[in-house]
Amino acid sequence: MMSGMPVIERVLRVVLNDPIDTDTMEQGLDVLSARLGVDTPQTVIAAAIAEAVRRGWLHDPVRLEPGALQCHWRLELTARGRTLTSRS
């Protein structure tokens, strides 16, 4: 079951085929928390995201798309993250 996995691994699995795209980080963390389905504090989830970005497994979620007037938050795996997650 996913609840026995480290938070970082659960985050990668949850967004593997369904990235999270919201207007703000807070909304994104709410969506991710709901998808994880466990009582993990959002500070722990945010730390797992930061570590996965640092390791090159997730793209930086704060994005300013071409032509956009404001940033949005999109959590998705990099090619490296997809390879890692699909092997597990």
Image (cartoon, helix red, strand yellow):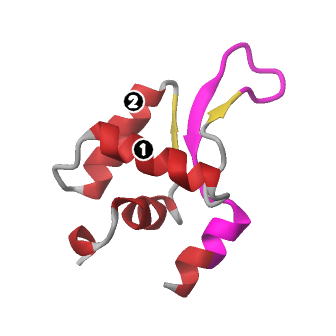
Q: Nearer the viewer, residue 51 or 13?
A: 51
Q: Which mark is residue 1?
A: none
Q: Image height check: is 18 above or below 84?
A: above
Report the residue that reaches farthest toward the left: 39
Q: Nearer the viewer, mark 2 or mark 1?
A: 1
Q: Residue at x 21, y 56 (%)?
A: 37
Report the residue that reaches farthest toward the right: 66
Instruction: Determine whether the residue tagged by mark 1 lies in a helix, strand or loop.
Output: helix
Which of the 4 image quarters holds residue 27? top left
Q: Which mark is residue 27?
A: 2
Decide whether residue 65 is among the magenta residues: yes
* Image coordinates for residue 74, horizontal then vertical, percent: 58, 40
Amino acid tagged 1? Ala
Q: Image height check: is 62 above or below 84?
A: above
Report the residue that reaches farthest toward the top: 69
Q: Residue at x 52, y 44 (%)?
A: 50
Q: In the visual, does 62 lie left or right of 2?
A: right
In the image, the segment drawn in magenta is 64-83
Q: Image height check: is 84 above or below 31?
A: below
Which of the 4 image quarters holds residue 47? top left
* Image coordinates for residue 38, horizontal then vertical, percent: 19, 55
Amino acid tagged 2? Gln
Decide whether residue 3 is among the magenta residues: no
Question: Could you classify mark 1 by the number of other residues whose Cα lies within 10 Å: few (under 14), some (14-19), or many (20 or more)?
Answer: few
Q: In the visual, does 76 lie left or right of 67?
A: left
Image quadrant occupied by the N terminus: bottom left
* Image coordinates for residue 34, horizontal then vertical, percent: 26, 47
Question: Could you classify mark 2 by the number of other residues whose Cα lies within 10 Å: few (under 14), some (14-19), or many (20 or more)?
Answer: some
What residue did someone put label 1 on? 47
* Image coordinates for residue 12, horizontal then vertical, percent: 48, 63
Q: Residue at x 32, y 37 (%)?
A: 43
Q: CA distance from mark 2 to mark 1?
A: 16 Å
